[in-house]
Amino acid sequence: MFQIVNKRELNSAVTLLEIEAPFVAKKAQAGQFIIFRVDEFSERVPLTIADYNREKGTVTIIFQKVGFSTNLLASKEIGDTISDFVGPLGTATEYEGMKKVAVVGGGVGCAIAYPQAKALHELGVEVDVIVGFRNKDIVILEDEMKAVSTNYYLMTDDGSKAEKGFVTDKLKALIEGGNEYDTVIAIGPIPMMKFVSLTTKPYGIKTIVSLNPIMIDGTGMCGGCRVTVGGEIKFACVDGPDFDGHLVDFDELINRNSIYKEREGEISKDHVCRMDKLAKDLIQ
Ligand SMILES: Cc1cc2nc3c(=O)[nH]c(=O)nc-3n(C[C@H](O)[C@H](O)[C@H](O)COP(=O)(O)OP(=O)(O)OC[C@H]3O[C@@H](n4cnc5c(N)ncnc54)[C@H](O)[C@@H]3O)c2cc1C
Ligand code: FES
């Protein structure tokens, strides 16, 4: 069993949990992920390793409550345990040769972008961080990101905090302004990663994206996480999740990720109803 040793609500929809998992912490590297199950009846859910502490033997995950399993995990408190926490899975990000990098994060994708910026900063690489959120109320990890970046640029869609606009507007302005990035790392919603890749392509800047297809086993056996990259079939759980953004078939990924949308909605609805009933029974 894996015990929760720290919990923070970063905003109304995003939770940080620090979990005691010494064997995962020992080997974890930026870019890798874990698969958790809350209990033996739960589904397997992949989440990126947002941070780790080898001395304490803990791993931090940051996740958005989007459906049944993420809401169930978020309902756990410090001291509670979960049954499975498997990892580190996937290939670690390759930083060799990087000198000046723009790390672009969108929404909860900032949780995944943060370990990338931190690892680059520790390697002495110049890191410009560009993050985007819909509005000021959902901004996360501002202080953490500032601490590991050379320059930090915050964008909000509605202009309620910092600069109004999209991360792609800022990235284009910085490139046009003479910043010679050797690499751009983009992590966030699939359309955002697609448009960052389209922005950097004309400038020939290497662009790495972290893909989040539906994953089941996380070990390359089920084929659930199949993506097309440069016309070849890849399995994101073992070949990725990092890929060359200029080669990814994003439209196929968007289609494949929506296959179970209807069923996921039904499951959340059923479970919420049962949980509501249970809560009401307990109160009475
Ligand atoms: C490698 C990887 C790393 C990820 N890292 C993070 C992270 O650090 N923080 C974070 O908030 N989210 C992350 N995700 C997404 C996260 O796995 C989904 O939000 C989660 O599975 C939703 O489950 P649910 O039951 O709460 O919601 P559901 O209602 O079941 O699903 C909501 C949406 O989540 C996605 N999803 C559902 N099941 C899976 C699955 N088995 N594998 C992948 N996606 C699924 C689908 O797009 C779906 O439409 C990551 C996904 C992958 C593949
Ligand atoms: S999740 Fe099964 S092959 Fe990748």
Image: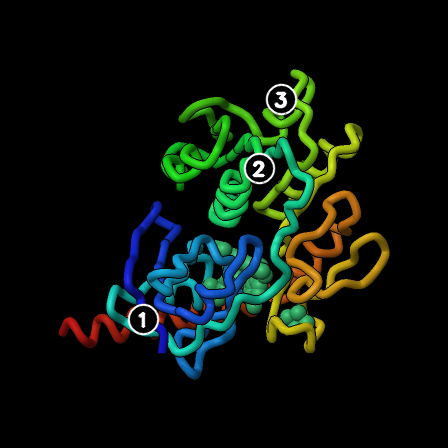
- Would residue 214 be found to the left or right of residue 3 on screen? right
Q: Which quadrant of the view contains residue 216?
A: bottom right
Q: Which residue is mark 2?
A: 104
10 Å crowding of disc 1: few (<14), some (14-19), many (20+): some
Q: Residue at x 48, y 36 (%)?
A: 133
Q: CA distance from mark 2 to mark 3?
A: 12 Å
Decide which of 214, 84 is in the foreground and name it.
Answer: 84
Q: Residue at x 64, y 60 (%)?
A: 91
Decide which of 240, 125 is in the foreground and name it.
Answer: 125
Helix, strand or loop at label 2? It is strand
Badge 1 residue CB within 8 Å of ligand 1: no
Disc 1 residue type (three-letter): Gln
Q: Position of residue 207 (x, y in %)?
A: 70, 40
Q: Which residue is mark 3?
A: 174
Q: Position of residue 99 (x, y in %)?
A: 64, 33
Q: Earlier in the sequence, mark 2 or mark 3?
A: 2
Q: State the quadrant of the C terminus.
A: bottom left
Q: Which quadrant of the view contains residue 177?
A: top right
Q: CA distance from mark 2 to mark 1?
A: 32 Å
- Asked if 248 appears above or below 91 in the picture, the reply is above
Q: Quadrant of ligand 2?
A: bottom right
Q: Position of residue 164 (x, y in %)?
A: 50, 23
Q: Which residue is mark 1?
A: 3
